[in-house]
Image: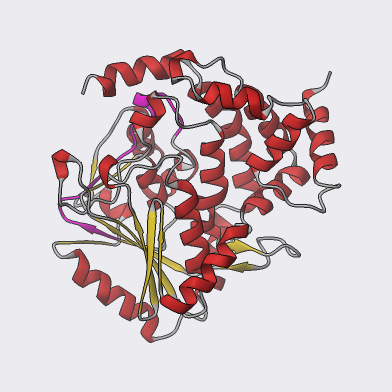
């Protein structure tokens, strides 16, 4: 049996020869109904187990998606599907156009003048990302990009309630390690996040009838970093057009220490800091202070007053109009990361992350480096 041929045959069948767009979770659900992947009932039983007791059923999803993404035609079609607005985002857009405010699990969105401010919120867990936050953050990104009154988008973290940092605004602590250890984060979460939410920040929203590299709805994104950007939150900064950081803030990418692959950071971080620093950050836990030579390769401004500088940058970017923003973003991507480069990376990521996520080493790393704390 040829795994690649079988995966492509199933993909063509479920997408009606690529005339129908399916997100990765729906694709795997339908493939499960056909018996090609674990069924919904099997996965539901697996989801109730802590990470160390899982049977590893989701590895089949990883291999399946890796074969699809490795194929230039099917893989590009799947990437295109994940860049389309979520179905529920259109309804939320109507509410946002009326009120200029949207409150979702994991995110809030507020329009201030010509800017929409997307605030990441998971206060108990230092704004960490998990299954409860991902749908809301992606919907908020969709709405900000679709809103006709928004010219630029701002991404920042909210005020947290976690005992150690209560009352502070923090950008975010990466993946929710508590939920990861407890088995509450499924393997597909990684693919939905990086093919969907994070890639939309970088590429904008696709349209059904044209290639994402030809037609997209996109705006400039500004990040405002308070405290720290750890793991996945550091990954997000690599998609931003402009980043402002507090002068006491820092970045880390401790995914190797945890036992996973840090999203698309392996693809994107070397463009900012070079290969050596990127490897030190990902493989050897290098902490990068924002107010350092390496930090300033990622940040555009390192300041004492983030709020004041943020207001100045929003005014600067909108006062002269943003008509060329989308074109300039596309021109940068054409040279630094075409969609086909991203697709090939994600084929490797899909396979390797499945093995990492379900590896006993991940559990051991969490118990050694996180649970003891």
User: Farthest residue in the bottom direction?
Assistant: 320
- Would residue 207 be seen by someone viewing this image from the given angle? yes
Q: Quadrant of residue 38?
A: top right
- Front-most of 292 and 195? 195
* Residue in view at x 72 percent, y 62 percent: 208
Residue 70 shows in the view: no
Rendered-image quadrant of the N terminus: top right
Residue 251 among those drawn in magenta: yes
Q: Is residue 87 above or below residue 15?
A: below
* The residue stretch that appears in magenta: 244-261
User: Residue 369's quadrant in the figure?
Assistant: top left
Q: State yes or no: residue 358 in magenta.
A: no
Q: Nearer the viewer, residue 81 or 340?
A: 81
Q: Is residue 191 left or right of residue 101?
A: right
Q: Is residue 61 above or below residue 105?
A: above
Position of residue 130 measured from the top left corner of the image (x, y, whole percent): 42, 40
Quick check: 122 left or right of 352? Answer: left
Q: Position of residue 228 (x, y in %)?
A: 24, 46
- Front-lying residue, 46 or 23: 46
Residue 110 sits in quarter: bottom left
Residue 2, horizontal then vertical, whole percent: 82, 22
Pick the residue in front: 363 or 258: 363
Relative image position of residue 9 (x, y in whole percent): 84, 34
Location of the C terminus (image quadrant):
top left
133 relative to 11 in the view: left or right: left
Going 51% across and 81% down the picture, which residue do you hit?
323
123 shown above or below 370:
below
Residue at 14% x, 39% y is: 164
């Amino acid at each position: 049996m040829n795994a690649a041929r079988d995966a492509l045959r199933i993909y063509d069948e479920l997408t009606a020869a690529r005339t129908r767009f399916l997100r990765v979770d729906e694709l795997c659900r339908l493939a499960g109904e056909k018996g090609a992947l674990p069924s919904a009932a099997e996965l539901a039983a697996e989801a109730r187990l802590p990470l160390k007791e899982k049977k590893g059923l989701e590895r089949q999803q990883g291999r399946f998606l890796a074969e699809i993404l490795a194929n230039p035609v099917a893989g590009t079609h799947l990437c295109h599907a994940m860049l389309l607005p979520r179905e529920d985002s259109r309804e939320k857009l109507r509410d946002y156009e009326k009120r200029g405010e949207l409150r979702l699990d994991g995110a809030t969105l507020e329009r201030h003048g010509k800017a929409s401010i997307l605030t990441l919120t998971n206060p108990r867990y230092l704004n960490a990302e998990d299954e409860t936050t991902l749908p809301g953050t992606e919907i908020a990104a969709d709405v900000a990009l679709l809103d006709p009154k928004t010219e630029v988008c701002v991404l920042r973290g909210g005020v947290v309630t976690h005992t150690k940092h209560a009352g502070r605004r923090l950008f975010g602590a990466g993946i929710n390690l508590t939920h990861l250890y407890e088995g509450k984060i499924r393997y597909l979460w990684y693919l939905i996040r990086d093919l969907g939410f994070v890639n939309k920040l970088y590429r904008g929203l696709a349209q059904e009838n044209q290639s994402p590299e030809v037609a997209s709805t996109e705006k400039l994104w500004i990040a405002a970093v308070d405290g720290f950007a750890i793991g996945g939150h550091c990954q997000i900064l690599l998609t931003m057009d402009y980043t402002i950081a507090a002068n006491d803030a820092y970045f880390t990418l401790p995914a190797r220490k945890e036992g996973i692959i840090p999203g698309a950071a392996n693809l994107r971080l070397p463009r900012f800091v070079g290969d050596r620093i990127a490897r030190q950050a990902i493989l050897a836990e290098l902490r990068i202070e924002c107010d350092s030579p390496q930090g300033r390769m990622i940040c555009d401004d390192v300041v004492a007053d983030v709020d004041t500088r943020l207001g100045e940058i929003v005014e600067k970017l909108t006062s002269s109009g943003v008509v060329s923003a989308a074109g300039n973003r596309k021109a940068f991507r054409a040279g630094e990361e075409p969609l086909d480069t991203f697709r090939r990376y994600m084929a490797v990521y899909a396979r390797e992350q499945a093995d990492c996520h379900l590896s006993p080493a991940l559990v051991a790393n969490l118990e050694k480096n996180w649970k003891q704390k």
